[in-house]
Amino acid sequence: MASLLRPGPTALLLLVACSNPAGTPVDFRRSAPAGTTSGPVAARFGKDAVTVAELNQRFAEMNPYARARYQTLEQRRDYVEGLARFELLAQEAIRRGLHNDPDVVEAAKRVMVQELLKQELDERAEAITDAQVKAYYESHRDDYVKPAMTRLSHVAFSKERRAQAEAVLAEARALAPMDYAAFGKLAREHSEDEKTKVLDGDLRFLSDDELAAQLGPEAREAAAKLERIGDVAPALVETPRALHVIKLQGRQLALNLSLEQAAASIRQVLLNETRQERYRALLEKLKADARFELSDEGLAKVVVDPKAPTLDAKGPQPGFVPGPQSPPPAR
């Protein structure tokens, strides 16, 4: 929760243990928005005060729905008392030394890491230019301009095996439309296409031109006549090279996005890539400054037994931050 109360006359500076033997000073004084620390006072507690100007700012920062809950004097009193309760409890926790509790310190570090990453990766991010967006679009045009695609599964036979092909066609047409596993079994057991039989006959998504090039224009024409996902062609598809039992697995509509239509999504992609690069650079610098080293010899001695019973925790779980995503492969 963000600090909600303005600084009192007495500084409340505490030392939290860290790698610096002298400790790092942490300021637990509450703060008010700039320009709201003077003027008429709405409440006092200890050596602190909540001003009318501060409350005006706080309420103005709320959305209209939340603001409607504080129209009466009683509702405003409850709000100010809530601020004071939080601050008084925080001060009491400090007096009891809870600011040095391992759980509290770990929670504070997590919040600090989040704020650091927000500042370094978001607030300082440079704007993506139109030229960058255009360059990305041109180098990834295939992602935004695609022909219609069809996904088929097939069982292929040489023409000398027509009788067996007809028998498999009858079996395939007797299957439930969505029973891809059974059709795949037919492909594994009977297909003579060694490349696809290990994939249950799956040809993956192909454009019309790719389908014609891979199997023949006859397969393209037969596929176009299949209306529903799961349909099996009513007859064998005969091409110059083979006989095919074909089943429709899916279709993808053609995609034809202009630069203007794709610009928003491209800008987000570039922002994410830039963010990852900044993250990677920040981590590398911090590791270099700290002379970070990993010992494979030491790690090899660590015991990780998945069958061992879970022990009671002896302290808060350490913070963990995942590494940056790998950059996309160059095209």
Image (cartoon, rainbow, N blue to C red):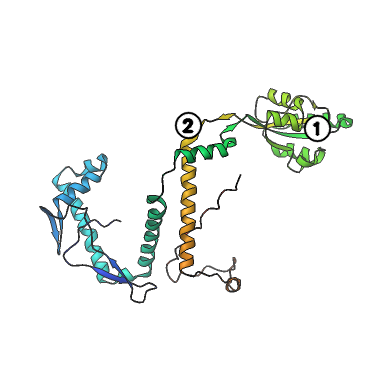
**Badge 2: few (under 14), some or many (20 or more) residues near its Cα, within 10 Å?**
few
User: What label sits on residue 168 in the rendered view?
Assistant: 1
Q: Earlier in the sequence, mark 2 or mark 1?
A: 1
What is the residue that sits farthest to the right in this orientation?
Answer: 160
Element class at badge 1 = helix
**Badge 1: few (under 14), some or many (20 or more) residues near its Cα, within 10 Å?**
many
- For the point 55% across and 37% down, the residue is 138
Q: Quadrant of residue 41?
A: bottom left
Which x, y percent locates residue 205? 66, 35
Q: Is residue 204 above or below residue 110?
A: above
What is the residue that sits farthest to the left in this orientation?
Answer: 40
Q: Quadrant of residue 88?
A: bottom left
For residue 258, side relative to residue 95 (left or right) = right
Which x, y percent locates residue 22? 33, 76
For residue 32, side relative to residue 147 (left or right) = left
> What amino acid is at disc 1?
Val
- For the point 38% across and 63% down, the residue is 109
Q: Which residue is mark 2?
A: 260
> What amino acid is at disc 2?
Glu
Observer-nearest of 178 and 13: 13
